[in-house]
Amino acid sequence: MVLVDTSTMVTALVAVGLLITVLGLRRRAAQAANEPRTWSLMLLGVASISGSVLVGKGVDAVAPDGGAFVRSVGCVLACATFYEALTTWNRRRVVVIERGETLNGLSAAMVGVALANLIAGHFRHPGPGLPQWQLQASLWVVSALIVVLGTALTIARISGLLRDPRIWLVTIAIGAAAGTELTGLTMHGPTWRPIEAVWLSVAALIVLSVMLAPRTGSTPSVAAAEQATIFGALTVLFVAIAILTVDNDFAADSSRWPTLYAVAGGIGASVRVVRLVRDLSSLAQSRREALTDELTGIANRRALLAAIDEALLTVGSTTLLIIDLDRFKAINDRYGHAAGDQVLRHMATTFEALIPARGLLARLGGDEFAVLLTDAEPGMPSALARSLAQAAAPLSDVKGRLLQVGASVGVATVESPGVLGGELLRQADAAMYQAKTSGSGVSLYDGVVDAVAQERLELVEDLHQALAGPDEQRDQIVVYFQPQLDARTGRVMGAEALVRWQHPRLGLLAPDLFIDLAEQNELMASLTDRVMREAARQAARWRAAGHRLRVSVNLSASCLSHDSLLLLLDDVLETGLTARDLVLEVTETSLMKDPELALAAMRQIADRGVGISIDDYGTGYSSLSYLNHLPATELKIDRSFTARITNDPRTAAIVAGTVELAHHLGMRLIAEGVEDNETLTEMIRLGCDETQGYLHSRPLPAEMFLEWLRSHSAHPVSPASAVTVPVRPKASVVVR
């Protein structure tokens, strides 16, 4: 009696301590992981264990066999809630909506009881045994414990927690409880002992600790969780069928318990299998839709990429053709997207009729299609590309009008398996772009051309960084200065600001290597901003050193029409640079792109007092009537005229006429490219106002230009004895 009382007290203490522990853990975990339902289920399971043990002790005092039943019911309820808590926690982690795990667990428990009945009926010793209700209660306890144990191990496996020692403590604890129950059945003794409550309490705490540490393993995927559920359902169904098959031959008595439980469990598992078939059908449909283009019904980009990867691994030669429709945007804009969709469907049908049986036609998106060929014969991809380009002919049926559609096709082939699918796609796309820009219709991938294009793309990205990146990259844009001298006195009148790019890999780059990139990628406004501010800053330094000079900055056509130009001018003029000390140089070509807009912009510039220079005069399509309306202050004779002035009388006559025209219009005339004394002398004879060229100085960095300016002011050189001032340019400098 003393032993029983001590056991009761121990069990009561464990139960109370367990309840307090779970309540504390629930509050902390619910706040951290937002799992209130999971923790409520765990708390209910612990309460079932504790309550059934304590209530069972009281029932034992009245009915000796009643306490065992109460404890069995409490154990089964606890296992059910532990199972639901584990599956709920797993569902939340993998975001699985399907709740078939509960049906799986119940079916597994029923089949487990059926199997236990079958085994117990065969191995039970002859003679008086346990009452049937007590036997069934105990078998339910064993089956429920095994289901919880299997569930915990399965979740641990798909979550990567099998190396966690707590999992194996769960196994030991639940196994010990199940073993105690089985021992009682085998020895025909009491079916419940207080020590089992302790084992179940320990198991509950360990399951809780596993749930508290989800970061110790990997987050399970939906596929892994569904696979485990499906495997469980099929296993339960197989065991149920096996039990029904051998029941009559294997059972030692005429008990129908195995049959009843096996049928119930098999029905539950069958329901889950039916759901499985439904899910697999839906999955197959979703997979087909995921690999098919909805508009045209052909393969989509995802299917093409998968086919490319497979082809590169399994076959020798792999060829990819990319087809881009020409003028498709115009069709969409003019006739609407419905007409555009009709064109795409028509093109898909047309292309598909030309593709060989082993080829794959796919739509990449928009108006781009692709064809994948494997082990094609030599010349076949090129012939197919020409056929595809020719097939994109005008088609009707849109408001009775012919739609002018064309196609550009790029072809890329790889022979070795080392190329990745993404690289093959890029090569074919590069070839297609070459076909489109050249207007050839079909282009084969050329590694040299692609390397040049890649270099340009890298330069564009580098230029973006140089203009908008960190300060250490922004310093890559540097400004050189070339002096402009009075042709007769040799006095320095101004300097032209010339941009250079100190590229970290390619060295010092002249403007002709990156100006067009800046123009094409809308970077000219930022580049002009940088050059003009630096020119203004250096002009202030010259003035502080006693040299008041004009500074000239080149403007492109895009800058002339950019909204930020006037704001930039106002900002620069507020820094102390006077308007008469700033000249903006504009080429004839840029003026003629949009004469009205250019004239309006130049008038706004002139209204601020800023000088305007017509650069490279004589190389464009000059219009005297247009020149008469320009508020320009100077003309710059292009170096192509300057170089021929001493040996070509017709060129000398043109320059003389230009000088007279400039003077009559109130403009000064500057000659570029003066490189020797003979040219300088001839320019002076023709009446040129100022000269600029290597005879005086190459373009120099700001510091070297200031040194040159000081040296020239201290030792002025007259035109008759003009000599080239020695400089020390870097070997990599490319100058204009």
Image (cartoon, rainbow, N blue to C red):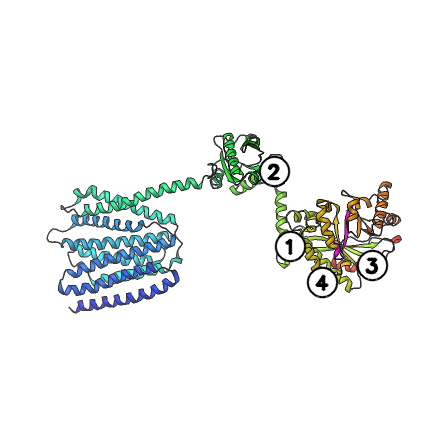
Q: Please tell me the numbered disc located at residue 467.
A: 1
Q: Where, by quadrant of the figure, is residue 656 drawn? A: top right
Q: Is residue 607 magenta?
A: yes
Q: Is residue 164 magenta?
A: no
The x and y percentages for residue 109 are 24, 51
Q: Secondary structure at mark 3?
A: helix
Number of the front mark, 4 or 2: 4
N-terminal-most mark, 4 or 2: 2
The residue lying toward the viewer, choosing from 507 and 457, is: 457
Q: Amino acid at mark 1?
A: Leu
Q: Which residue is mark 4?
A: 575
Q: Secondary structure at mark 4?
A: loop
Q: Residue at x 14, y 60 (%)?
A: 65
Residue 732 visible in image:
no
N-terminal-most mark, 4 or 3: 4
Q: Amino acid at mark 2?
A: Lys
Task: Report the Cα–Cα distance between label 4 and label 3.
Answer: 27 Å
Residue 444 visible in image:
yes
Task: Report the Cα–Cα distance between label 4 and label 2.
Answer: 48 Å
Task: Report the Cα–Cα distance between label 2 and label 1.
Answer: 30 Å
